Amino acid sequence: MALISKKKIPYPISPQLREYLTKYQREVPLSIHYTDLHRFSNAISLYDPKGHDTLWLSVFYEPGDTQDIFYALKTIYAHLKVDGDLSILSHLSVDRVDLCTYGNTRPFRIRIVNQINDNFDYFYIKHADASRVYGLELEDVLSPNQVSYLTSGNSLVEEHIVGMPGDIFMKTHLQDPSLNPIRLCKEFVKFNERCFIRLLGDMHSSNFIVDITPDFEEIYYRLRAIDFDQQSYEGKKSVYMPQYFRQNNPIIELGMKYMTPESVRQYQIEERTQIATRMRIEKSRANDILDVMSEDRLSSPEYIAQLRQELARHYQHQVFLECRTMGQLVRTSLELISHH
């Protein structure tokens, strides 16, 4: 079973990482930051439609400040979605600002409504932790998913990733007669492989979503990470393998029932090949982020020493023992699949 150690230590964005973010237009000067949103004057608990406490608070600001804060939030949304085109602001309104009260990161979630058609969207503002930035960037470069995010000083802005939270999916959909267990398990194998190769940890069922796409004869699934807090931090290899989290057992049990070891192996090879292809296509960007990450401090010397030993054993490759940083371990893991 995968166990996460004590509360993760956040690491700041280094000057080199900031340079990378500026080069690739992720760093944007914003007029409001994470710390500013903490200046609320009131808050109420937010309940879901069934009356359960969501553990989020809806926060309120002084009337004199609200207009400026909401305008700044709409501007952030324009940067995130339409490259800063402020002409869309006239028909957007901020419906709610919520603060998460559980977990380490205490993000703010902003609900934006399009007044023309009542369509709504969310985005998040968090404290900018370097691990999370690397996690988002590697997701954008190496996974089949594009991720929209921005940094500004010590703030990180993330888009809302649409899909059904893994834990809710397992409770409500695994007994569904229209479920295609083989397709679902195939996607879990590929997701597991993706997380392990790029060392994204803590992918228990609350930290990924299931994106369900009905086709004319079939249902397709994709598993997507939604929390990048544990990118290359822990020392235990099992933390980077979603298969070892007991919260994911319902899918694991399904896999044991429907998958053969040969098909699991085939899907692992497929995913490695796709990652190697993405590395080739995004060669200069992938090299740039790995150059910066290889010199950055993202974990403790103890965790790095433990993980390089475990990876050297896992891959039966001594090259991992030469790595001094988490970034070098990620690069070595990616180079290994690129050469196979």
Image (spheres, rainbow, N blue to C red):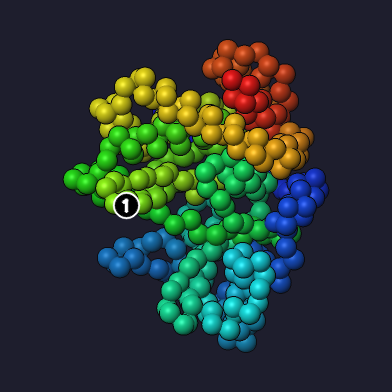
Amino acid type shown at disc 1: Pro
Residue 267 image position (x, y, % from top left): 42, 28
Residue 257 image position (x, y, % from top left): 25, 27
Question: At 55% from the left edge and 59% from the top edge, which residue is drawn?
Answer: 159
In-front residue for pair 254/54: 254
Question: At 57% from the left edge and 52% from the top edge, which residue is drawn?
Answer: 147
Say whether residue 18 is visible: no
In-front residue for pair 229/141: 141
Residue 38: quadrant of the picture: bottom right
Vertical placement of 57 versus 179: above or below? below
Question: At 80% from the left edge and 45% from the top edge, which residue is drawn?
Answer: 16
Question: At 80% from the left edge and 50% from the top edge, which residue is drawn?
Answer: 19
Q: Residues within 10 Å of mark 1 (few under 14, many from 20)?
A: few
Which residue sits furthest bottom? 64
Give the residue at mark 1: 214
Vertical placement of 139 versus 249: above or below? below
Residue 306 image position (x, y, % from top left): 61, 22
Location of the C terminus (image quadrant): top right
Vertical placement of 32 versus 20: above or below? below
* Element marked by disc 1: strand
